[in-house]
Image (tube, rainbow, N blue to C red):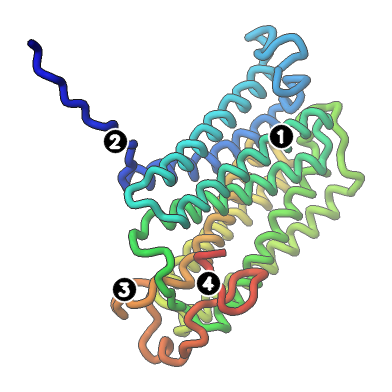
């Protein structure tokens, strides 16, 4: 008689923390890449290469002909967006199956997927509304929100400490207030840039409407917002070097300054060169890198409490003591005092 076979229960899939971190990084990179690819669709005049959504044509999911360049560009963009959505799903599953599970990672993974899904619906509206400028602007703004959420997820996957562990500031309250103003200024720069785009020559299709604004006027307004943003960044960098922030924050301010200078130079180059499409594409990438640099600076404004003073983000001892217990958690943008940047 054959011996009985002992069946072991199937163990649920567990995701090691390093695997989830790699997924989060891939998701973040893909969110930036798909935003640039979306700009390529517009800059090549392929915005209406597919006349409807989710099908490319009313009677066909794919382009009718591979020789239709505009249709193939738009359809490729849709495939890339679908791949980003799958990465978002992978991040959610990875956060749920992470060993050990952390509720903050689950929340940020779900939030990032929600941004992606919501922007997918807005992308459909962009097609249905025939590239109406307001819908295109909303599409880009939602992409910025997804990048913000994706960066939060990636940053948190690099910290294995308990998410509810108290945090301490790595900058003085005055410095945190300055960075809050800097973040608002960055938002104004990005939004004004989308208005320039909505008024400019690269509409995505020659049949698309444009904002009824003079391109020279909105370009000047965008330039003024950029100068204000740069001035605030210089002020923040100055305060950081004077001891209002730890070395890690100082490095982030230097990174931001470098990206802003490069982006500003590129913006003036494209304007005086007649706004060539290929330069606009690089300018879009630069805008996303500026946004990431601002968010990285904000995330550096706090760290888990109990870390040694020798750690890169810590304030000098005299400045840290001056903060007091009430300043242990800097306020988040749009939030009251007591919330800290890493949990906004």
> Callout 4: few (<14), some (14-19), or many (20+) C-alpha neighbours within 10 Å?
many
| Contact (Cβ within 8 Å) of mark 4 with mark 3 | no
x, y percent for residue 134 = 82, 43
- Of callouts 2 and 4, which one flags the residue occurring earlier in the amino acid sequence? 2
- Of callouts 1 and 4, which one flags the residue occurring earlier in the amino acid sequence? 1
In the displayed structure, 208 sits above or below 18; it is above
> Callout 3: few (<14), some (14-19), or many (20+) C-alpha neighbours within 10 Å?
few
Nearer-the-camera pick, 109 or 81:
109
- Of callouts 3 and 1, which one flags the residue occurring earlier in the amino acid sequence? 1
Residue that label 3 marks: 311
Instruction: Estimate the spatial distance between the alpha carbons at disc 1 and disc 2, rounded to whole Å.
Output: 40 Å
Instruction: Estimate the spatial distance between the alpha carbons at disc 4 and disc 3, rounded to whole Å.
Output: 19 Å
In the displayed structure, 301 sits above or below 271; it is below
x, y percent for residue 115 = 62, 45
In the displayed structure, 93 sits above or below 290; it is above
Q: Secondary structure at mark 2?
A: loop
| Front position among marks 2 and 4 | 2
x, y percent for residue 275 = 72, 41
Instruction: Estimate the spatial distance between the alpha carbons at disc 2 and disc 4, rounded to whole Å.
Output: 38 Å
Q: Is residue 231 in sight in this rendering? A: no
x, y percent for residue 228 = 69, 69
- The numbered mark at residue 11 is 2
- Of callouts 3 and 2, which one flags the residue occurring earlier in the amino acid sequence? 2
Residue that label 4 marks: 340
Nearer-the-camera pick, 130 or 329:
329
Q: Is 97 positioned to the left or the right of 46 in the image?
A: left
- The numbered mark at residue 123 is 1
Q: Secondary structure at mark 3?
A: loop
Q: Is 160 positioned to the left or the right of 104 in the image?
A: left
Q: Secondary structure at mark 1?
A: helix
């Amino acid at each position: 008689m054959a011996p009985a076979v002992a069946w072991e229960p199937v163990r649920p899939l567990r995701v090691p923390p390093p695997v989830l971190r790699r997924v989060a990084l891939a998701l973040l990179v893909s969110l930036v890449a798909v935003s640039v690819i979306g700009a390529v669709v517009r800059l090549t005049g392929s915005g209406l290469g597919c006349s409807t959504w989710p099908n490319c044509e009313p009677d066909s999911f794919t382009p009718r002909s591979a020789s239709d360049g505009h249709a193939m560009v738009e359809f490729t963009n849709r495939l890339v967006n679908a791949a980003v959505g799958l990465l978002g799903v992978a991040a959610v599953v990875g956060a749920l199956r992470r060993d050990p599970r952390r509720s903050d990672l689950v929340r940020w993974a779900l939030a990032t997927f929600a941004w992606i899904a919501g922007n997918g619906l807005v992308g459909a509206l962009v097609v249905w509304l025939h590239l109406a400028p307001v819908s295109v602007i909303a599409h880009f703004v939602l992409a910025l929100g997804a990048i913000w959420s994706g960066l939060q997820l990636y940053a948190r996957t690099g910290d294995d400490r308990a998410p509810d562990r108290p945090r301490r500031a790595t900058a003085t309250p005055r410095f945190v207030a300055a960075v809050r103003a800097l973040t608002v200024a960055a938002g104004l720069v990005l939004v004004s840039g989308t208005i320039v785009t909505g008024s400019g020559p690269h509409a995505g299709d020659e049949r698309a409407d444009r904002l009824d604004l003079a391109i020279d006027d909105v370009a000047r307004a965008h330039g003024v917002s950029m100068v204000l943003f740069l001035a605030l960044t210089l002020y923040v960098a100055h305060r950081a070097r004077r001891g209002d922030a730890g070395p890690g924050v100082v490095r982030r301010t230097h990174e931001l300054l470098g990206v802003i200078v490069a982006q500003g130079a590129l913006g003036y180059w494209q304007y005086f060169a007649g706004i060539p499409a290929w330069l606009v594409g690089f300018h879009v990438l630069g805008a996303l890198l500026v946004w990431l640099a601002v968010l990285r600076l904000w995330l550096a404004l706090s760290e888990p409490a109990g870390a040694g003073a020798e750690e890169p983000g810590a304030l000098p001892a005299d400045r840290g003591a001056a903060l007091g217990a009430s300043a242990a958690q800097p306020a988040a943008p749009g939030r009251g005092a007591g919330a800290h940047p890493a949990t906004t």
